[in-house]
Amino acid sequence: MRQRPLCLSILLALAVGARAQEPDYGKVEIRTAQLAEGVYLLQGAGGNMTAAVGADGVLLVDDEFAALTDKIRAALKGLGAGERPVRYVINTHYHFDHTGGNLPLAQAGATLIAQDQLRARLLSGGTAGNGGSIAREIKPAEPGALPQVTFDHELTVHLNGEDIQARHYANAHTDGDAIVFFARAHVIAMGDIYVRYGFPFIDINGGGSIQGMIAACSDVLRSAPADAKIVPGHGELANLDELRTYLKMLEDTSAAVSAALKAGRTLAQMQQAKILGAWSERYSPPKAFVDTDAFTETLYYSLKPRVLRHGGRPQR
Ligand SMILES: [Zn+2]
C-alpha cells in the first residue's frame, strides 16, 4: 500500500478524540489500472473505485470525496470516457470516503444507486463505530447526495455489453452493503467487507457484524470464477486466495472471541490475555487504525448478544 487510506487516519483521530484533519486533496493523484476490457481500478484517497468505461457511458463503483471529483473525471477521460459525464454510480456503503463524490456527480447528471438501508443511513446520519472505543459522528447527507434508485436484494445495470450486478449482503461492514459483480470481466468490488490495511473496521453501530462479514466473504468465494479479480475497499487488488486467507482470519479470530465469551471472560480479560495475539503481526501493523485490542473489542460487541442468547454465562 503506497499510502495509508485517508479515511483511517480521520477515523483514528476521532477515535482518540482529536479533531479530524482535512486531507490535502491537492496532493492526491488518481492512479488507474486496467482490470479487463473497459473495466478499471481507480485509487486516490479514500475507498477504491471501480469504473466501467465504454460506448454506453461510464459507471463508477464508489466515488471517494467531492474535492477529488474533478481529478476522478480527468482520470476517466484518460481511460476513454471523453467529455461524457458519469452516468451511474453504485455505492458499496454509506461511509463518507466512499460516497463523498455523490453530490457533484449527481449534479452533473449521474444516477446514484444503492441498497435501501444505505440511503436511509445517508439520510439520517448517526454515529459510526465498533460499539466501543471507535466512534464518529456522521452528519445527514445533503438531499442531492442521496441515491435516486435503491434496491433491496439486487440490481443489475446493463452497460457496455456487461452485466454489472450489485448484491446486498446483510449486516456485514454496515447494514446497507453491496458487493458489485462484473460478470464478463470477472471483477468483484467488495467495498469495505474486504480491506487490506489489517484488521477490518466493522461499523457495528451502523448495523455491521462479524457474522455478516464472514457470510459475505464465504458467498463470494463460493460463487466467484477462479480467476476473479477482487477489488477491496482499501488496499491493492487481490485474488481469491488472498480473500480466502482473510476469511480464515475472520473465522478464527471470531471463534477465539466466541470461546472466551462462552467461558465468561470480560473484554478486559480477553485483551489482557491477548487472545488475538497470533494475528497481530500480520493484521495490526504499527499505528493500525484497528489494532489488536480494537479488533478484540469489535468482535466482543458483535458476538456478545448472540453468544449470551445461546446460553453463555452472563457478563458482569
Ligand atoms: Zn467503510
Image: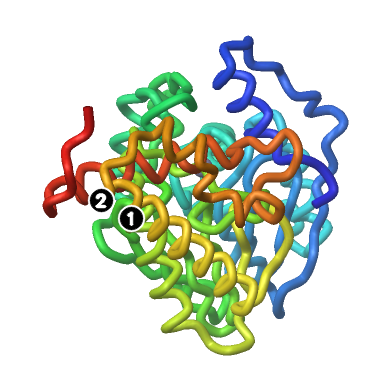
- Judging by the rendered image, the residue that carries numbered circle 1 is 259
The colour mode here is: rainbow
User: Quadrant of residue 244 in the image?
Assistant: bottom right
Callout 2 environment at 10 Å: few (<14), some (14 to 19), or many (20+)?
some
Percent position of residue 184, x then y: 56, 84
Q: Inspect the image, locate mark 1, and give the three-letter code of the amino acid beneath it.
A: Ala
Q: Residue at image x 47%, y 49%?
A: 91
Is the CB–ligand 1 distance for label 1 below 8 Å? Answer: no
* CB atoms of marks 2 and 1 within 8 Å: yes
Q: Residue at image x 62%, y 64%?
A: 231
Percent position of residue 148, x then y: 35, 44
Instruction: From this view, report whether residue 130 is shown above or below residue 260.
Output: above
Q: Which element carries disc 2, helix, strand or loop?
A: helix
How far apart, in angstroms, are the residues tagged by discs 2 and 1? 5 Å
Q: Residue at image x 63%, y 10%?
A: 19
Q: Which element carries disc 1, helix, strand or loop?
A: helix
